[in-house]
Image (cartoon, grey):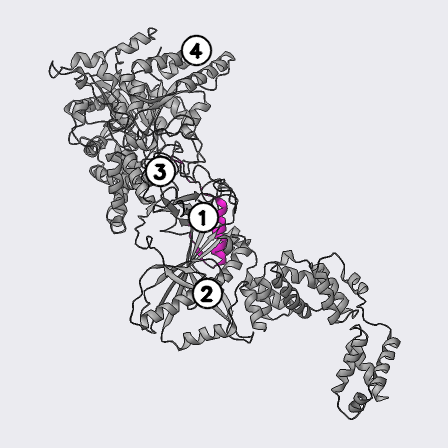
Amino acid sequence: MLRASLRQVSAALKEGRVTPTELCQRCLALIRSTKFLNAYITVAEETALKQAEEAEERYKRGQPLSILDGIPIAVKDNFNTAGIETTCASNMLKGYISPYNATVVQKLLDQGAVLLGKTNLDEFAMGSGSTDGVFGPVRNPWSYSRQYKEKSVPKSHSEDKEFNWVITGGSSGGSAAAVSSFTCFAALGSDTGGSTRNPAAHCGVVGLKPTYGLISRHGLIPLVNSMDVPGILTRSVDDAAVLLGSLAGHDPKDSTTVQDNFKPFELPNLTDVSKLSIGIPKEYNAPGLSSEILALWSKAADLFKNAGAKVVEVSLPHTHYSIVCYHVLCTAEVASNMARFDGLEYGHRSDAKESTESMYAATRREGFNDVVRGRILSGNYFLLKQNYEKYFVKAQKVRRLIANDFVKVFRSGVDILLTPTTLSDAAPYMEFIQEDNRTRSAQDDILTQAANMAGLPAINVPTALSERGLPVGLQFIGRSFQEKQLLTVAKWFEKQVQFPMIQLEEVKRHDNDVFHHQKSASFS
Amino acid sequence: MLLTLLWRATFPSMQVTVSQRIHNLLCHLLSPWVPVVGLEIHAQISSNSKLFSGSQVQFAAPPNSLVSFFDASLPGTLPVLNRRCVEAAVMTGLALKCSINKKSLFDRKHYFYADLPAGYQITQQRVPIAVNGSLSYSLCMDSKMSQMVTKIVRIKQIQLEQDSGKSLHDDTRSQTLVDLNRAGVGLMEVVMEPDMCCGEEAAAAVRELQLILQTLGSSQAVMAEGQLRVDANVSVHRPGEPYGVRTEVKNINSLRFLAKAVDYEIRRQIEELENGGTILNETRAFDSRLGCTVPMRDKEGKQDYRFMPEPNLPPLILYDAKSLPANMNHQQVINIDWIHERLPDLPSVKREKLVEQYGILPEHSFTLLNEDGLAEFFESVVKQTQMKPKKVIGWILNDLLSYLKQYSLTVKESPVSSFLLADLLNLLEKKEISSTAAKQVLAELWKGEGKTPLEIVKEQKLELLQDQKELEQICQAVIDERENEVMAIKAGNRKVLNKLIGLVQRKTQGRSNPVLVKQLLEKKLSE
C-alpha cells in the first residue's frame, strides 16, 4: 500500500480499502524504522493522527475534501507550519514555532492532507547535498536498496558498511528521501537553483519546479526571493499534476504570484509525439557530465526521435555564465534576507551582553553555519556601493541574457527542452564532503539553475539506474506557465522508461500489501 | 502689533520677535556668506493600515499591540502594498506639481537597528513615485502686512517608504525596549531642493506643506505626534563659489525649533569658517533646551546601505486615462487622472477665494487657513450674519483668536460657536448694542454657560437706549452740568464734544449709540 502512487492510494481511501488513520499509522511506523535516513527533522505524530481521524470522519460521511483528503504528506522544514517547529536546519531557528502556515501548507491542510512532519535540508536550503544542516546529513534510501547493495563493491572489507551510503542531493534531500522511502505520498520542497530536481534525480522520484509566480511563496523562508519556487516531489508525474493543481494560483499574500486563474488539469495519455519539437541544448553537455548520463540523455533523445518527434540541437549560449551570475544574485539576496535574524524578535539569541552590536554578532555567529555566513559576507560585498554596478547590476544583465536564451529557443519552435538533471548519480557521503559546499553547489546546480534564472517550469523524471544501481533522472524544461504541456510530455516519457521501484527491506516489512509488482529496469 | 499677530498665527507655537527676525534678515544681507538650506521631510501617511501589512495605524496605542507577522519580520512573510498609501502619495505629488512616475520601484536599504526588525527598510531609492515638483509659500518681509513675498522651493522627489519602530533606551537598567507599533507605517519622504536660505523660509515652506497635506488628508502632519519629521541640510558658501560642505540637522520637532535650528546652524558654520575652521559632513542633533546643534554619534553617515531591489514587490504601475487598460479591474489599478480631478482646493486657492469672495486682506486669508477650522468658522459666521465680512474678520482675528490663544484652544474647542458669534454680531449690526457692549457679551459667552447673546444683553442691561426722549434728557443733563465744556465747544473747541459724549456713555453705562449721542449733543449745543 505504501508503495502506491498518490492517485492509487486516494482511490483506495475512497473505496474504503484503507482508512486514513491506518495509512497514517503505517507511514509513521515506517518513518520510525527508517529513522537512520534522517529524512525528517520533526515528526508531528500527534497532529498527523488527529488530522487522519478527521479525514476518516469525512470519508465515513462520504464527504472527502479532495483527492488529497487523508493522504500523508511531508513538508520541507523551510516552510512555516503553525504549531510545528520550523527550523531551516539551523541553530538560528531551532525550537522556533511559527504562528502561521505557509500558503502552500494551508492549502494542503484545507484539502485534507495529513502533515506527517518536516523534512531535513541543508541549512536555510543552501547546499546541494542535504549534508549541511544542523541535524546532520540525509541518507539516500537507495543506499539501502537491494539494487545498490548488489552492484556496489565495498571498497574494503574491513571498512564499515556505513561508508558506502550515498547522499540525497539537495537541498530538499529530506523530502526526496521521504517520498523515495515511501514514508509519505508527496512532499513539498523548494527550488532556487535546483533544490527540488537535484535530490529528486538522486532519489529516483519526480521533482517539479513550477513556473515562478504560479505557486505562492508566502511562508516559504526565502533563499533567493526572485528565484525561489515551492517544489513538488512525488512518485509519478500524474501525482505531481495533482499537487500542482491543489497548490497553484494567485495568493493575495504574495504579490509576485500571477493574477490569472489557474485551472487544475488531468494529464492526457499522449499517444502521438510526432507534433512535438524537443530541444537538446548543447551547452548542457557540461564539463563533468558522466558518460553514463550522457549516453542516457542521447538514448532519451532517440526515444523521442523514434516515436516521431522532432529532436533538434539548440544553443543556450549564456548557460556558462549562470554559475557565477547565480552566485552574485543568490548571495546578495541571502545577505539581505538573513539580516532579520538578529536575535531580537525570534530565534536564537546569544548571551553576549556588552552591547546590541556584540549581541547581534554573537547571535549570528552562533546561529549560522559557515556556508550561510560565507554567503552573507560575499553578498554584502557585492552590494557595497562601489561594487553594486560591477557585480549586482552586471549579474542581473547576465540573468536577462540567460532568460532571453530560452525565449529565443522557444520562439524558434521548440516545445520542450530535454537535459540531464545531474552530472552523475549520487556520490557517497564520504566522497561528497571532500569538497566545500560552494564548489559542490556550483558543480551540481549547473544543469538546473538556468531554469530558475528564467523562471521556467522544469521537472526531473527518474529515468534509469546507473551502473552502481543508483537512480539517474533527466530534466524537461518547458515554456512559462505551460505546465500542462511539460507534464504531459514528462508523463509520456515516464511511461516509456518504466523506472524501477526501489527495493527496500524496511518497506517490505511494513507493507505486505503490494499493489503490483513492477518490472525491474527496462531502460538502462 | 498686527505683524506679531500674523506671525504667531502662522507658526502657532513660535515666538520669534519682529526685531530678531529683521536682524536675521539684515545679517544675511550684509554677510559675505550665502546660506543654503534643503529639507528632507517624512510625512506619515494617514491610512487605516500600514504600508505593506494589514496592521492598524494608530498613535499612542499600547506598545506592540499593532504588529503583524510581517511587521515583526517573521521569516517567510511578504510585503503587500497598501493601495491607500499609493493614492496618498499620488495626491501629494499632484498637489506639489510633481510628475508622477507611471512605473516606480521599491528597494531595500540595509542597516542593523533594534527598531528595524527586517534589517532593511523598504523604500524607493532608484525610481520614486513622484519627481520634479514645486511648492510656493509666502512669508512677510517687514512689519507692514502688505510686504508679503511668495517664494518657491523645488521638490526633488516624493518616495514611499516604511517607518521604523521605536527604541526606548533604559539607561539605568542598560536595556533597550522596542515598540513595533510604528514599524511599517507608510511614509512619504518629500525631498526639497536647497532653495531656502534661512530658518524662517524653511519653517514657512514646511508650514505650507503641512497645510497641503492636511487639506489633502494624505497626512495628519502633526509634528508633535511625529507625523511630520523634518531634517535640514545646511551649508554656507561665499557668493559665486560652489556650495559648502553641508551638515544634516535632525531631531527637530516643531516649526519654531526648525527655524531656530537652521539659523543656529548657519551662524555656527559661518563662525567656524570665519575662525579658519572647516565644516564636517556630519549629522547634528538640535538640542531644544540649549537652542543649539550638537554632533550626533554618527554611525549612519558613514554607512553603506547596500541598496538592493526589493524582489518581493513587482514594479508599481500607475495609469492615466490614456493608458488605462480597458478590461482591467478598477480595484486593481490607480488612475492618476481620476485622483487629479478629485483633488480638493489647495490652501493657496482657498486663500485666493477668501480674498475674492469676502474682500478681506490677503494676510487675513493666511491667518484664516493657518488655524485649523478657522476659515470654515469665519465663513459660517458670515453666512449667519448681516455684518460685512470685512468687519466680521476683525472679530474673528482680533477677538476670537486672542481668546483661543490665551486659553490654548483649537477652533473646534471654542466655547463660542459660529452661531453664537453670528448672533452677537447681528445684535451689533442691528445697533441693539454698542461694540463695547458686544465685547462684554463675548467675554460672557466665552464662559460657555449656555446663555445666548440676547440673554446676556438682557441680564446685564447692555442694550442700547432706544428711547430717544430719555437719551435727550440725559444729554441735556450733561450739558447743564458742564457749563465750562459747553463754553469751550461754543468757542470752537470741537474736541471737547468727545468728552461730553463720553460722559453720556458713562451715564448710560455704555448703552447709548455714540453716533446718535453726538448728533443729539450737537443739535442741543447749536440751539
Q: Which label's residue is closer to the chain start, 1 or 2?
A: 2
The residue to which callout 1 is attached is: B318
Q: Residue A343 has which mark?
A: 3
> Which of pointers 1 and 2 indicates the residue nearer the eye?
2
Crowding around mark 1 (Cα neighbors within 10 Å: few <14, some 14 to 19, many 20+) is many
Q: CA distance from mark 3 to mark 2?
A: 41 Å
Q: Are marks 3 and 2 on the same chain?
A: no
Q: Are marks 1 and 3 in contact (CB under 8 Å)?
A: no
Decide whether residue B491 is among the magenta residues: no
Helix, strand or loop at label 4? It is loop
Q: Looking at the rendered structure, which numbered label has been put on residue A25? A: none
Q: What amino acid does circle 3 point to? A: Gly
Position above or below: B383 against B149: above
The stretch in magenta equals B74-102
Which residue has dot 2 on it? B259
**CB under 8 Å between discs 4 and 2:** no
| Residues tagged by mark 1 and mark 2 found on one chain of the structure | yes
Label 4 in the same subunit as label 3: yes
Label 4, label 3: how far apart the Cα atoms are: 44 Å
Image position, residue B113 (x, y; %): 36, 46
Residue A466 in view, yes or no:
no
